[in-house]
Image (tube, rainbow, N blue to C red):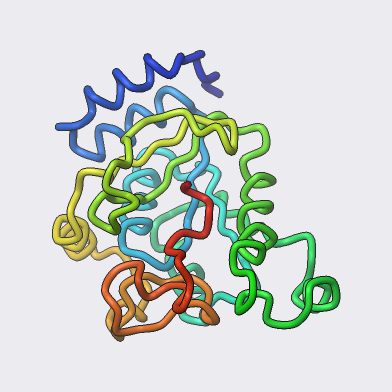
Amino acid sequence: MTLAPAYSPSDLAAISADFEAADPRAIVEWAVTTFGDGLSVGASFGGASGMAILHMVAALKPNVHVFVLDTDYLFEETHETMRRSIPALGLTNPNVYKSALTHEEQAAKYGSALWMRDPDLCCEIRKIQPNRVALEGKTAWVSGLRRDQSEGRADTPIVSWNEKFGVVKLNPLANWTEKQTWEYILANNIPYNPLLDQGYTSIGCYNCTVPGVQGRAGRWQGFEKDECGLHT
């Protein structure tokens, strides 16, 4: 096990700046070497970026802690992508985390179809709270955020301190484009969610995701919202 060294915010900012011109695989290698068993990879099995990250990490550390947030509203195609990808990538430590409330318990406590009335609360219950559990005892969290995914992600740092979850946050693909990401996916024959070939560009819960809309604008239609809160 590799224990994470203590980094100040200025240390992380300097590291992030140094990585601006780095290949994402070099960033992933640094993360694996630096944080060891303290490293955790969040996987949605929805977007192409997350699949590229999983491939990069698996090549170096197949037993990395991979966590999936099952909201109880994931597309069946997302579940199937997970079932295909875990053995295909050689990952040996996948973990699924769910809300403390079942769908029925949430409806009884907050009313039915909470996502249609208060999607922020629904995301808090079904994504943010389980994410806290997933990262307990971890020191670093790798995600597949890219700056070109939305205006809100345009300033995404490659490495930073995440106050909300108390870990170092790494976004190795931050400065990659969608084109670069797909080139990597196809060149390495990496499994991906088939909904991405059916007009979906951002895949989350089936009750809050629509096809045919570019980027994250296809999420939470009718609300001033394009993030679940995990990355804000």
Q: Position of residue 123 (x, y in %)?
A: 61, 62
Q: Nearer the viewer, residue 84 or 107?
A: 107
Residue at image location 38% in from the left, 15% down from the top? 10
Q: Quadrant of residue 187?
A: bottom left
Report whether residue 132 is seen: yes
Q: Quadrant of residue 182?
A: bottom left
Residue at image location 31% in from the left, 63% down from the top? 48
Q: Position of residue 99 (x, y in %)?
A: 72, 61
Q: In the rendered view, would you say 130 is above or below 161?
A: below
Q: In the rendered view, would you say 45 is above or below 213?
A: above
Q: In the rendered view, would you say 83 is above or below 132?
A: below
Residue at image location 46% in from the left, 78% down from the top? 222
Judged left or right of residue 214, residue 134 is: right
Residue at image location 67% in from the left, 37% down from the top? 136
Judged left or right of residue 60, residue 115 is: right
Q: Position of residue 7 (x, y in %)?
A: 46, 15
Q: Nearer the viewer, residue 92 or 161?
A: 161
